[in-house]
Image: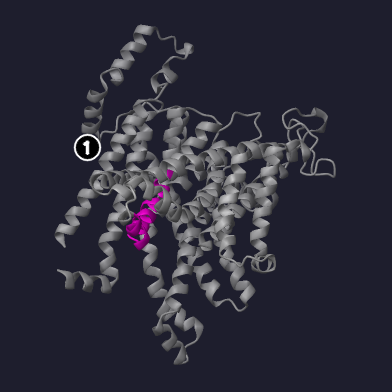
Amino acid sequence: MSRYIIGRIGQALLVLWVAFTAAFLLLQALPGDAILIKFQNPELGLGPDQIAALREAYGVDSPLWAQYLQALGNFLAGNFGYSVQGSVPVSQELLANLPATARLAGFGFSLAVLVALGLAFLATLAPFAWLRSAIQAIPSLFISVPVFWLGIMLIQTFSFRLKWISVINPGEWEGLILPVITLAVPISAPLAQILMRNIDEVSTQPFVAVARAKGASPGWVLWKHVAKNALLPTLTIAGILFGELLAGAVITETVFGLNGIGGLTERSVRFQDASVIQAVVVFSAACFVAVNLIVDLLYPVFDPRLRKAKGAAA
Amino acid sequence: MTSFASIDAFTTTPATVSRTNNLFGRLRGVNPGLVLAWLVIALVIAWAIAPQLFTSFNPVQGVPSEKLKAPTLIHILGTDALGRDLFARLVYGAAHSLTGAFVAVVVGLVAGTALGVIAGSTGGLVEEAAMRLVDVLLSIPGLLLMLSIIILLGFGTVNAAIAVGITSVASFARLSRSEVVRVRRSDYVEAAFGSGGTFLSVLWRHVLPNSLTSVLALAALQFGSAILAISTLGFLGYGAPPPTPEWGLLIAEGRNYISTAWWLTTAPGIVVVVVVLAANRISQSVGKGR
């Protein structure tokens, strides 16, 4: 078992290293560069020799392999370089923006889970067949909606038409309502789909038939027998959902003009601030790998059947 | 645009072959939702090929006196701030959004399937390396990967499409590899090798055709998500430059008038939703058709 864990951690580190290298190579091959974009502006009145001095200070003219080794060393030491546009260390910028995004993502994810559970249960328990199939179709509708458009529609409806939520200087929590809904919709869809499929699958199992034959109501069967077994496999898409959450944050924060990792990402793409992008890419890859690793390692804890299989094999 | 038609021809075959051959039986087996999905896609493709048949207005040149008009019988979806007919812009925009999505799917399909087929049929170290590469691609959130590629390639319709395509390479590679591995173990492939087929000929004659159905279902699904992704990039301003009536850009432009001209954001969004829904519905039917 411990060999398995070490192997999985090694694999995760390998993926991270390749992601770092790929991001580095990709972003170093940029046609323009952030320093020129920021400092070539004639209003700053910098001469060519001053720009050259700046380039040397940022280390953009040394050979590629030297830059790579230095960047890798710095990354391992937790130093992600300087944000050219923001004129602060990237790590500082990430840390400053992390809490807002974490809050948005946390609420968004919780709401998504609730919506997905609600949809999945309703799709099984709703009284009429047509209603059940209508509810089953909702996740595919959610998947097809552009997130940015959803955000705009929500603003249009609730802020301008109904005037429930003010757009100008909303309170801290009031301003979070629409972004959280916007973020939750695309996350809830794949969750609900997987849940519905699992509920269908588990419902065909003999033990469910037995429970029903004993006279249990549909709600009881669903809650006591099916739900437990249907929830577990949703863990496997946790990593993918995390990626969706981050992508959703980029769009949501742009649409609603919020500060956070997403807005930071959008700005740094606009100004070709490669070191910020690279840090965000490696950061999100690290989170993805970590989430998947944790899920893989925790799975046997939640599912005793897997533990037994492992024990028998060892 | 002929390439659209050929893809269509491909995707319909598996679904119809499995049904009975007489026309009556085929009609009875048809699902109204699926027909509607095909009609939507056909209509949008027609918009892209011959936009002038659907609207007489100019999508780029506006009439200033007609600006920000709510939907009427003449301007069925209203006009924007420069007096351009929104419906005309949507119709002409279909070409940009569809070509973009098409390029994206082709990039993903060709590169991903090549990677997956090579990995699945050679095995060993090559397979290991290719699949690790796929893991890395999957570990980076799609939008971030697109944005990274876009700052590398620069802004523009084609570049945005390529970026979207590259993000789908991983899923195509995974799927085609598993399909190839599955097919390769089957009896008829062993028989083909046994009766003297070379590696490449067996791959071409037996392995590829039999792994294609699910790959095509994924292609249809990716077509829908590519339309979404391209409109997202257009909205963020990384796709086609402004006068272009690209759907995402239309929504971005309408955003400045949400308090006064609701139709400018609502209509393009609904078009995107309907087209993506149709593509996903078709993908579902292709997946089940085998």
Determine the residue positioned at 20% across, 49% down.
A10
A120 in the magenta segment: no
- Measured as percent of width and height from the top left, residue A131 is found at 62, 72
Give left or right: position of B124 versus B107: left
Give left or right: position of A46 versus B30: left
- Residue B242 occupies which quadrant of the picture? top right
- Count of numbered marks: 1
Q: Is any part of residue A260 visible from this angle?
A: no
Give left or right: position of A48 versus B266: left
- Residue A47 occupies which quadrant of the picture? top left
B177 in the magenta segment: yes
* Secondary structure character of the magenta stretch overall: helix
- Measured as percent of width and height from the top left, residue B98 is found at 60, 41
Q: Residue under circle 1?
A: A76
Q: Secondary structure at mark 1?
A: helix
* Residue positioned most to the bottom: A214
Magenta residues? B169-192
- Measured as percent of width and height from the top left, residue B119 is found at 32, 47
For label 1, the crowd category at 10 Å Cα-Cα, with few meaning under 14, some 14 to 19 and many 20 or more, is few
In terms of depth relative to the viewer, which is nearer, A21 or B13? B13
In terms of depth relative to the viewer, which is nearer, B121 or A154? B121
In terms of depth relative to the viewer, which is nearer, B191 or B148? B191
* Residue positioned most to the front: B195
Determine the residue positioned at 48% across, 47% down.
A248
- Measured as percent of width and height from the top left, residue B114 is found at 39, 43
- Residue B79 occupies which quadrant of the picture? top right
